[in-house]
Image (cartoon, helix red, strand yellow):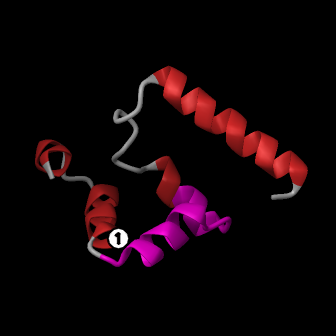
Amino acid sequence: MRWYRRDPVPAYREWLEILDRSWSEVREVLLDRSEEGKRLRQTDPFCGVLAPHERWRIYKEFAANEARGS
């Protein structure tokens, strides 16, 4: 909520509403491959939560899973 008070942009309001949903609904948003899903992920409020090396590890794991068709 602190990030929203600091910079109350509409995308943050949108994420606040998403995060009020059940975990399964939040998960669907996070995994949505549509243009809407991509748009939401590009404006997510979590960009500073993980260290760069943690993000790269996740990216690499995701790419490996995509290559395997998982």
In the picture provided, is 51 more to the left or to the right than 39?
left
From the image, tell me which residue sits under label 1: 18
Foreground residue among 9 and 56: 56
Residue 18's x, y, as percent? 35, 70
Residue 16's x, y, as percent? 26, 64
In the picture provided, is 67 more to the left or to the right than 29?
right
In the picture provided, is 28 more to the left or to the right than 69?
left
Note whether 61 is above or below 56 in the view shown: below
Q: Quadrant of residue 34?
A: bottom right
Q: Which residues are magenta?
A: 21-39
Note whether 49 is above or below 67 in the view shown: above
Q: Secondary structure at mark 1?
A: helix
Residue 4's x, y, as percent? 18, 51
* Magenta highlight on residue 45: no
* Magenta highlight on residue 32: yes
Label 1: how many residues lie within 10 Å, few (<14), some (14-19) or many (20+)?
some
In the picture provided, is 23 more to the left or to the right than 13?
right
Instruction: Examine the residues drawn in magenta and state their main secondary structure.
Output: helix
Q: Amino acid at mark 1?
A: Ile
Split into 4 quadrants, where in the image is the C terminus?
bottom right
Q: Which residue extends farthest top?
A: 53
Foreground residue among 29 and 54: 54
Q: Quadrant of residue 46?
A: top left
